[in-house]
Image (cartoon, rainbow, N blue to C red):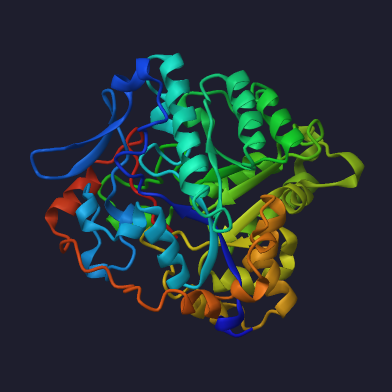
Amino acid sequence: MHADDMILISVDDHIAEPADMFEGHVPAKYRDLAPRVKTDEQGFQQWWYGDKKGRNLGLNAVAGKPREMFNVNPSNYSEMRRGCYEVHERVRDMSAGGVLAGLNFPNWTGFSGQVLNEGPDRDVNLVMIQAYNDWHIDEWCAAYPDRFIPCGILPMFDVELAAREVRRLAAKGCRAATFSENPVALKMPSIHSGHWDPLFAACSDEGTVLCLHVGSSSRTVSTSSDAPASVTMGLSSAMSIYSLGDLMWADFWWRFPDLTFSLTEGDIGWIPYFLQRAEHIQDRHSGWTGHTFPDGMGPADVFRKRVLCCFINDPVGVSLIEHFNIDNVCWESDFPHSDSSWPNGPEVNERQFAALSDEQINKITHLNAMRHFSFDPMATRPRECCTAKALRAEATDVDTVTHVGRPPDERDRDYFKTFTPSQPAPTPAH
């Protein structure tokens, strides 16, 4: 399939949330407690929720910059393109990159909303989480309902409230919620504990996908304390390996027949090996582990039936596509992060999908995302207006080069060294 003819829906993009996002969504009695952006003595802008520091902008907002201009340090809004934080400019950028629609994860809150969950007052936390969700759905996504798949944050500090929020979001048309890749790392019960059953039941009932984004456990992969930064960046998908391992051996699937998880931003080329390894474990070790599966299934079947996965540019994964249930494989752009293929997503896909049929390509690039997230942009936009060529024709005046920012220096490398399990390094934004 030619790049021009592709219809691209990304299941992983991000918002560098605008500083005024909470205005109009936080009740008056809580307004003074709302998160806000502060500028430090070095001129860096940073989100704060009380005394909780938000995640930095840095590598999370470098779309359009050459790699010689990527910063790790906290940045500010003037050093990124407006499409990172302004919805109208975001849509123009999407069109310039040939992307029809995207599911947008949060940034400053942590990818599973960790910062908003960690405040000292649970009532205030819930107010801010719901305010975030209302802004995201009612302002950001509602501005262009044919261009955005909404994704909610959950009050994970209370599983009953989390289940209730899933149902509230579903009533607003939101069928995706971000959840931690490893709740134990956030000092919460594991997915094997039974604690999360009310949430899983709500998601199963409502058709809501629980998304496990790399970095949503606030942990990074580490080897040695003096390892170069490239080691951490290169091993980031390991967190998705851990998530897949947990999911394949979980016992809740049979209680919640319509529950679906998504592994986000972890690539897919490594998955077939771990499916093979899991089947070997079941074959050789189930006598003493006592692990059983109903209806003759095995761990690989669990993955293929109930877990979604996605990638940006993963030719190895594409070459192994026969090992996957192709109905559960999706594409991601990851705008505006540092690994994003924007604005060349269609061309990257033309190369990596060269050996696939048009039917396979259409599933990966948009049909699977539409089905799993109950999203139909073509209900209002004619299909012929959804192709990369048609979208780019609507945005010929967009300059895809970002002309602001500064070259990286020792400040960025020094800042990267300060990351600990409680203050995660930016994911490489595949």
Residue at far left of view: 41
Q: Is residue 57 left or right of residue 179?
A: left
Q: Decide: is 399 above or below 331.
A: below
Q: Quadrant of the C terminus?
A: bottom left
Comparing 250 with 28, the one in front is 28
Residue 192 visible from this viewpoint: no
Q: Quadrant of residue 420?
A: top left
Q: Is residue 146 left or right of residue 420?
A: right
- Which residue corresponds to the image point at 60% horizontal and 74% vertical from the top-left? 385
Comparing 228 with 31, the one in front is 31
- Which residue corresponds to the image point at 64% horizontal and 42% vertical from the top-left? 173
Q: Quadrant of the N terminus?
A: bottom right
Comparing 60 with 387, the one in front is 387
- Labels in figure, total: 0
- Which residue corresponds to the image point at 42% horizontal and 26% vertical from the top-left? 128
Q: Quadrant of residue 91?
A: bottom left
Residue at far right of view: 295
Residue 16, x across and y down, in percent: 35, 48
Q: Is residue 67 left or right of residue 137?
A: left
Residue 161 visible from this viewpoint: yes
